[in-house]
Structure formats: C-alpha cells, structure tokens
Amino acid sequence: AQKITQTQPGMFVQEKEAVTLDCTYDTSDPSYGLFWYKQPSSGEMIFLIYQGSYDQQNATEGRYSLNFQKARKSANLVISASQLGDSAMYFCAMRDSGNTPLVFGKGTRLSVIA
Amino acid sequence: DAGVIQSPRHEVTEMGQEVTLRCKPISGHNSLFWYRQTMMRGLELLIYFNNNVPIDDSGMPEDRFSAKMPNASFSTLKIQPSEPRDSAVYFCASSPEVMNTEAFFGQGTRLTVV
C-alpha cells in the first residue's frame, strides 16, 4: 500500500529565504507520480509541482523545485525566495497509476515571517 | 473550463438530517474522487469512480454515507442521518486517466452538523 510521510507539522522561514519541506513515501510499484499541493487559509487545494518516478531530472516550477531522491524514497519540496503569500499548508501526495486516487500526507504548515 | 464545481460551499444542518453534497467534474475527466478533510485525520479518501463506476468505497466511514455518479458530469455524496462528527470539509476532485496529471480539486463544501 502507498504511504506518504510528512514529519514536519510546522515550519517557519524568514521572508526571501529558501525552505525545504520534507516528504518520504513508500510504494511497491516501480511506476508512480509524486505531487505537491498548497492549501492557503482560504481552503482551496492548489497544485504546485509533479515528479514522475522515471524522470531523470528534478522537477522545477518557478520558485518551486522538487528534490527527488529515489533510492531514499524522498520527494522534498524546496521553495526559494519565500514570500509572505507562501504561508499555507503544504501536502505531499502520490499515485501509482492514472486512474487511482492521490494518497496524501498529513501536511506541513509553513509560516513565512517578515 | 470552470474547473470542478461543488455545491453548496457551506452547509449547516441539524443532527439527524439528510445532507447531499454535489460535484460537477471537469469535462473529459474520467476519474472522480471524494475526500474528507479534518484537523485530526487530514485528507481522507472516501470513494472514487472511474468512468462513472465506483471502484473503491472502503474509505466511506459507515452505512450512513453513500455516493453516486449517475453520469460523467455529476456526482453526489449523501449522509443520512448526519451526526456532529461528520463536520468537515468535503472535497471533490477529478482527473484524466493519466498518471502524470494532477487531480483538480473543487472549492470544497464545509459541513457543520449541530
């Protein structure tokens, strides 16, 4: 069975600094996808970034990058140059085929300090 | 496309009443998921459909919960009778049948049972 672990319930970061949010996963399927979502206080779920298990390079999307270490089964999200608007809950998720649901971690609450 | 549309956005009901949550997925998406979010349990998958057929309802808490998808553009989640412990945010999400594509979430329905 798939499992996602996010060990940091809360994180603080200074504005303009970089921050890493940890995510480890477990699956027996060699083919899978990893996702990060942001949930601001308004409640919507916003997709940030995707990494496929066979992708050779780490995914990047603007200020977001995914530090994918397959052997360690980790998929950490790196946010560069943090902004006050980055304060939110961040969820790591995975799926192992196109028609299966995303399995989510418990989330990390990030607070950006001015 | 307007995205995944859920209604109502907020629902307050008395214990024992029937509650129906509605979802319109994105056109062309053939997978639909219902999640429940609470502080204690995080994001839990309740049920998901592929091509309108329920695939896995093992996450449905008990017989008071039921879900239907009568056609590709509409799904309902019903709670009868409702209880205070059902208070949560209920999300509907849809995705195409492709592993490297994220699930698109609706805005959620905040349910309060008093």
Image (cartoon, grey):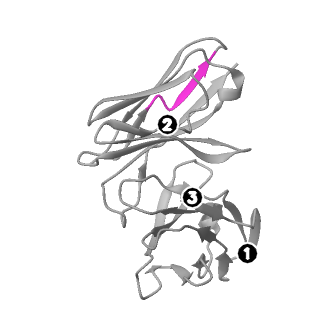
Q: Nearer the viewer, residue A90 or B67?
A: B67
Quarter occupied by the C terminus of chain B? top right
The residue where tag 2 is placed is B57
Up-down relation of residue B88 to residue B82 (above or below) = below
* Helix, strand or loop at mark 1: strand
Q: Amino acid at mark 3?
A: Ala
- Would you call the spot at circle 3 few (<14 residues within 10 Å), some (14-19), or many (20 or more)? few
Q: Nearer the viewer, residue B58 or B6?
A: B58
Which tag is nearer the camera, tag 1 or tag 3?
Answer: 3
The residue where tag 1 is placed is A13
Which of the chains bears the disc numbered 1? A
The residue stretch that appears in magenta: B7-13
Q: Which mark is residue B16?
A: none
Q: List x then y, in percent, for residue A42.
A: 58, 48
Taking A90 as reference, is A56 left or right?
A: left
Q: List x then y, in percent, for residue B20.
A: 47, 22
User: Can residue B2 be spotted in the picture?
Assistant: no
Q: Amino acid at mark 2?
A: Asp
The answer for how far apart the CA atoms under marks 1 and 3 are is 33 Å
Q: List x then y, in percent, for residue B73.
A: 27, 35
Q: Residue at x 36, y 64 (%)?
A: B99
Q: Amino acid at mark 1?
A: Val
The residue where tag 3 is placed is A1
Q: Nearer the viewer, residue A31 or B111?
A: A31
User: Can residue B8 be spotted in the picture?
Assistant: yes
Magenta residues, dominant SS class: strand
Q: Earlier in the sequence, mark 1 or mark 3?
A: 3
- Would you call the spot at circle 2 few (<14 residues within 10 Å), some (14-19), or many (20 or more)? some
